[in-house]
């Protein structure tokens, strides 16, 4: 389905709170099967517990649980690799493993049924090429519908129309039929709340990694706030190593 | 499309040149990896390491000892603190080298057991657990004194038993907090230490200028050694408790980022920082009052010094700083105790049940209880000087053996020994370090030495009885 048969499949990092019994819906495994998946089972410890101490007692259990999840991905026809980490800082671990694994996107899991309708939210400079490659890989062979939603925050000069058209074109080039793609744009005071509100009508959300701002450091990343508010799982597309931005 | 990115999905990118380190875990700046491939994230940075070192130490030297030390040695108590700082540095350098070669939880115990064998290792590992228990009890009694001082300040009458009860309550609370997982305890500790340093720098800056005569006449200097030079050394042995924090940095070696850089910086940096503050404190305090008057104020003498400079506001500020400092020292020590218990139980010198953690709170409840429980029993005794000296005794034995361990490692370097930091001219550091550590013990009160030796004999007996068949992974 892809343009370039030699290109590697994009890698999706799936972080799972492995000792808290977090499970992944089977439908999600099916949805992600076309991509390479790295399942990262992690456990966050309070500062007073040495990571080594936790690993001595819970390592086997964590590895077995992660293997189980990876097995579900393999059953669904995908390639899945596993990592297990004990940490005091979830974000540091996820970011490190994502970099080491060369992950295109990170999954922020939420419950999901069959994925038929996909929301691609664009609300600032993103790596449109990586995003389009990921979406095309995931749904290229199926018949799911994609809605590309561009949201411009009030008072910014972000050209949502152009960005949405750009993503649409890239998806089409990568083999997603034009009649499966819907586009929408909106201007909003609170883009995150808007995306969360719209996400209710979709089975999964794909969006770009947001830039680190003072706000995001204090109150949490925008994408994380979307994931917390949304009912659907969110795939966060990471910035490429060299491409700072493409759209806008 | 992602050809030029990092590992491209391979799992073994962490396996660097340091992979073949003792204890079979692979090491890198960001993670260590267990035999089964599980990654252990390193999350404590330089600031966190410094905060453990400074936070553990600062409670005692400034807020408990000035009165006691000035009573024994006069203004030469400043010399006692300087001697302590030099000894601490002589030990901090070898500890840094060993810690960068073996950045594993357990610190001093781990190096001594790997370099010198299971028996000395067991004695050090078990004694340091109890040494930390004594140190924690000492900090808690200090905290009790400050809390009682606050009560006095607001007009509540307090007696001697109040100090002990306040210490007991705070000890139980701290242990409880750590048992039930205070997620941001470490960050809180960083802020507490920062706030403390700010208060102290203002206080010592003002007091120092005052003593030099900037705000009036210079205070007439008292004779530096009113009791001769000998008390300066015995007092150094007493106040060495104020330097027991730097090696605690090594107990978190397994969780510290970029251990090759951060461990030496945090250890040496925290000794230099608190050493300078201690010497300045004694200078300011003995300039403000004669050492006789200072001594009569007891554990909270520094509050009277602040009152002399800035009236009630000064006294209240220092009382609050004292509360923060002693509680942060106590808390840091409880955490170190738990890590010390983990380190010996990992090697099966204690039943492995001691290192079990509970999943609900994610905390090592058994090890924390093994620290907190005996601490409370010791607090009830309430003898500050004996608690301090026994804690120092047990730490000094470990420090001396760490220096010996460095010599042993260097004389016969195993293939995996590849420290990122090497002590220059190591015999010139490690030999005086060992001699000074063991030497300070000779200046302690007989009671402290008897208790210390008894504890070491009991730990050796425990080793013979329980663990003589233990073989250590990665021993020299």
Image (tube, coloured by chain):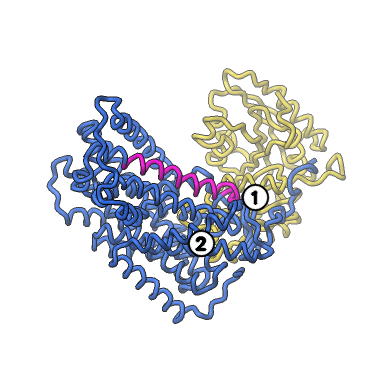
Q: Residue A129 location, x and y as percent?
A: 76, 34
**Closer to the camera: disc 2 or disc 1?**
2
Q: Secondary structure at mark 1?
A: strand
- Residue A22 visible in the current orientation: no
Q: Residue B104 location, x and y as percent?
A: 56, 59
What is the crowding at mark 1: few (fewer than 14 residues within 10 Å), some, or many (at least 20)?
A: many
Up-down: is B427 above or below B454? above
- Chain that bears disc 1: A
- Residue B426 visible in the current orientation: yes
Q: Quadrant of the C terminus of chain B?
A: bottom right
Kindly identify which residue carries mark 1.
Answer: A14
Residue segment shown in magenta: B257-282
In the picture, residue A234 is in which quadrant? top right
Kindly identify which residue carries mark 2.
Answer: B402
Which chain can be seen in blue?
B
| Cα gap from disc 2 to disc 1, whole angstroms | 44 Å
Up-down: is B229 above or below A175? below
Q: Secondary structure at mark 2?
A: helix
Up-down: is B469 above or below A223? below
Q: Residue B237 location, x and y as percent?
A: 35, 57
For the point 73% across and 40% down, the residue is A135
Q: Nearer the viewer, residue B217 or B252?
A: B217
Which chain can be seen in yellow?
A
């Amino acid at each position: 389905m892809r343009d370039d048969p030699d290109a590697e499949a994009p890698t999706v990092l799936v972080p799972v709170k492995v000792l808290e019994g977090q499970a992944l819906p089977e439908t999600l495994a099916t949805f992600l099967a076309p991509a390479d998946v790295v399942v990262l089972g992690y456990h966050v410890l309070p500062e007073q517990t040495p990571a080594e101490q936790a690993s001595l007692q819970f390592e086997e259990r964590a590895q077995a649980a992660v293997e189980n999840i990876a097995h579900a991905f393999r059953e669904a026809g995908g390639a899945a690799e596993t990592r297990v980490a004990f940490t005091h800082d979830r974000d540091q671990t996820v970011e490190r493993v994502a970099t080491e694994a060369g992950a295109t996107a990170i999954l922020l899991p939420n419950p999901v049924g069959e994925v038929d309708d996909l929301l691609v939210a664009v609300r600032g400079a993103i790596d449109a090429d990586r995003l389009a490659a990921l979406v095309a890989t995931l749904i290229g062979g199926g018949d799911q519908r994609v809605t590309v939603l561009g949201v411009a925050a009030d008072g910014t000069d972000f050209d949502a129309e152009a960005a949405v058209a750009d993503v649409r074109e890239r998806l089409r080039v990568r083999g997603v039929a034009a009649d499966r793609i819907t586009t929408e744009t909106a201007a909003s005071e609170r883009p995150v709340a808007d995306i969360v509100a719209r996400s209710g009508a979709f089975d999964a959300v794909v969006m770009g990694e947001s830039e680190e701002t003072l706000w995001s450091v204090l109150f949490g990343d925008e994408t994380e706030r979307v994931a917390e508010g949304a009912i659907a799982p969110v795939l966060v597309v990471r910035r490429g190593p060299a491409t700072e931005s493409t759209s806008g | 499309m992602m050809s030029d990115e990092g590992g491209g999905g391979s799992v073994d990118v962490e396996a660097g040149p340091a992979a073949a380190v003792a204890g079979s875990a692979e090491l890198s700046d960001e993670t260590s990896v267990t035999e089964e491939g599980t990654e252990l994230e390193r999350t404590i940075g330089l600031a966190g390491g410094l905060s453990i070192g400074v936070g553990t130490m600062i409670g005692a030297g400034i807020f408990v000892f000035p009165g006691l030390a000035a009573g024994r040695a006069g203004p030469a108590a400043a010399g006692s603190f300087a001697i302590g700082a030099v000894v601490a540095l002589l030990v901090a350098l070898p500890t840094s080298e060993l810690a960068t070669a073996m950045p594993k939880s357990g610190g001093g115990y781990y190096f001594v057991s790997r370099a010198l064998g299971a028996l000395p290792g067991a004695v050090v590992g078990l004694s340091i657990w109890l040494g930390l228990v004594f140190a924690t009890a000492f900090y808690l009694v200090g905290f009790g004194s400050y809390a009682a001082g606050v009560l006095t300040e607001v007009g509540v009458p307090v007696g001697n038993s109040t100090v002990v009860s306040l210490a007991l309550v705070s000890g139980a609370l701290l242990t409880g907090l750590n048992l039930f997982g205070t997620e941001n305890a470490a960050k809180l500790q960083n802020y507490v230490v920062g706030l403390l340093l700010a208060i102290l720098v203002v206080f010592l800056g003002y007091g120092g200028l005052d003593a030099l005569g900037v705000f009036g006449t210079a205070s007439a200097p008292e004779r530096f050694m009113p009791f001769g030079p000998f008390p300066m050394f015995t007092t150094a042995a007493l106040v060495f408790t104020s330097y027991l924090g730097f090696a605690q940095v090594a107990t978190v070696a397994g969780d510290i980022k970029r251990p090759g850089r951060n461990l030496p910086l945090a250890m040496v940096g925290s000794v230099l920082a608190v050493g300078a503050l201690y010497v300045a404190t004694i200078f300011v305090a003995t300039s403000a009052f004669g050492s006789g008057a200072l001594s009569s104020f007891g554990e909270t003498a520094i509050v009277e010094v602040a009152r002399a400079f800035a009236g009630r506001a000064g006294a209240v500020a220092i009382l609050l700083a004292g509360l923060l400092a002693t509680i942060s020292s106590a808390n840091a020590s409880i955490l170190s105790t738990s890590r010390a218990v983990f380190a010996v139980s990992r090697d099966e010198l204690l039943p492995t049940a001691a290192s079990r953690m509970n999943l609900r709170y994610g905390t090592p409840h058994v090890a924390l209880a093994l620290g907190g429980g005996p601490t409370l029993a010791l607090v009830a005794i309430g003898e500050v000087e004996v608690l301090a000296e026994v804690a120092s005794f047990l730490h000094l034995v470990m420090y001396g053996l760490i220096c010996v361990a460095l010599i042993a490692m260097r004389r016969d370097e195993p293939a995996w020994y590849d420290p990122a930091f090497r002590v220059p001219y190591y015999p010139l550091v490690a030999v005086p370090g060992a001699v000074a550590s063991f030497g300070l013990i000779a200046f302690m009160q007989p009671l402290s030495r008897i208790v210390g030796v008894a504890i070491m004999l009991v730990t050796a007996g425990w080793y013979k009885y329980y663990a003589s068949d233990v073989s250590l992974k990665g021993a020299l």
